[in-house]
Structures are given as C-alpha cells and as structure tokens.
Image: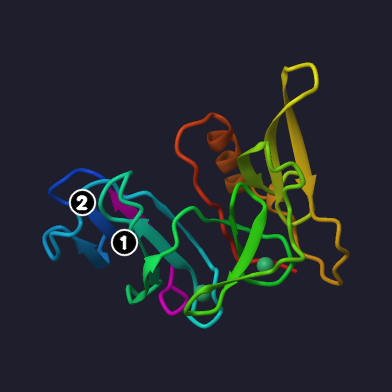
Amino acid sequence: MPERPGLEVFYMVETSVPAGVYMVDANSGEIIWKQNREDDPAWTQGPSGWTADIWDGSPGIEAISNRAGHDDHHYLLFSATGKVLRNPFPAGCTSVEWDGDLTRELLSANGTKIGNFNGKEIIDVPELQPNPLPTASLSMVADLYGDFRDELVLITILDSGKRGVAVVTATEPIAKKYVTATAVLDYQLWLARNMGGGYRSVYDRELQE
Ligand SMILES: [Ca+2]
Ligand SMILES: [Ca+2]
C-alpha cells in the first residue's frame, strides 16, 4: 500500500471460522481491511493465493485468494486497499517477470502462456511462450541467473526415462537495468524456503535501478 508508511502483510486464513483474507500492518498487527466468513458465508475453507503488482491501474500490489476450498477454484482479485477488482479471477495463474516492464505478467497453462491484466481481463501475449517443453511440468518461477527477470524451472522426462531439470530464461534484450533480486537477503531466504517444497509463493518487490 504505497500511501501507508512501512510494510503490510497479506494473510490468507484457512481454518473455517476466521477463513478469509486480512491485510495487516506489519509493525502493529492492526487489521487494515479484511473479508472473511464473519462478513460473508461464501468464505468457507481454504484460501490459497498470492500478491504481486500485476496492474498499474491500481497503486501497489494486487492480492489474489480463493475462498471456498481447493476444489472450488473461485478466486477473487483485490486491490491493495481491499477493493474487489475482479470476481471471479481466472484460476491457474501465477505471476512472472518476463518482459522487463514494471508490473508482473500472469503465467498459465503450465508456463506456456503469458498475459497481462488490463483491469478487467487477462490479455494473452501470443508471441511470449516461455515454456518450450509443454510436456514438462512447471516447478518454480524465480530469478536465478542474476537478471532481474524470472526464470522457469521445469521438470522434464529425458529420453532415458529419468527425470531432468530444465531452466528457461528470457532472451529478449531490454534497455533497462535493475538490481537483481538475488542480491537481496530476503529473496535468498524466500528461494531457500520455496526450494524446500510445500506451498508455492510469489516474491514481488519494488525494482531498484
Ligand atoms: Ca498495482
Ligand atoms: Ca513485466
């Protein structure tokens, strides 16, 4: 939330009674806004989601959460201030920094499709197809090579039948320079946590030139 000093934490709570989402002041724990089962019985179980700046039409990050369990796939997109920007929001997306502009793109279809959110819908960019191995499964999206843009980590099956790991990076030159995320300790810790398995998360940050 650019207009607030300090940092915020976006919580997604899975358990049934307080199931919902909460934007909280990281310093004080004060709830800035929330949507949960107390307000709306549609919030039943589950939230999974993430935050990233995917649209420059709304200041700061956007936040995505499902609200009714793993099989429901009913996602909502919130602005940083809690306004519902899209209901439902398409399921099956994660965010990626691929094109070098200041907002993140949306990656779907096992890493084969990239789109941009325009405030209403996701507009695909057909010429950007980061995953050249559609039979491989997308394992991770992260900046590994020290370019500030992300790489895709794919699990593939080799001709021998054994599993292999492929890393795909954006090759389109861009006339911008930013400090790589891997120079930031927070990012290194996030990478280590995500390599350990479990829930996937998204790391977004303000780019520094
Ligand atoms: Ca935004
Ligand atoms: Ca971008």
Percent of width and height locating residue 140 = 62, 41
Residue at x 86% of width, y 56% of height: 171
**Callout 1 crowding tier (Cα within 10 Å): few <14, some 14–19, many ≥20:** some
In this orientation, which residue lies closer to the viewer: 54 or 3? Answer: 54
Percent of width and height locating residue 126 = 72, 66
The N terminus sits in image quarter? bottom left
Mark 1 lies on a secondary structure that is strand
In magenta stretch: residue 132? no
The C terminus sits in image quarter? bottom right
Can residue 188 be seen? no
Q: Are marks 1 and 2 in contact (CB under 8 Å)?
A: no
In magenta stretch: residue 4? yes
Mark 2 lies on a secondary structure that is loop
Could you say which quadrant of the image residue 199 lies in? top left
Q: Which residues are magenta?
A: 1-13
> Closer to the N terminus: mark 1 or mark 2?
2
Amino acid type, label 2: Ala
Amino acid type, label 1: Val
Q: Which residue is mark 1?
A: 24
Q: Is residue 8 above or below residue 201?
A: below
- Which disc is residue 78 wearing? none
Q: Alpha-carbon distance for marks 1 and 2?
A: 15 Å
Q: Which residue is mark 2?
A: 19
Quadrant containing ligand 2 reads bottom right
Could you say which quadrant of the image residue 162 lies in? top right
Residue at x 69% of width, y 69% of height: 125
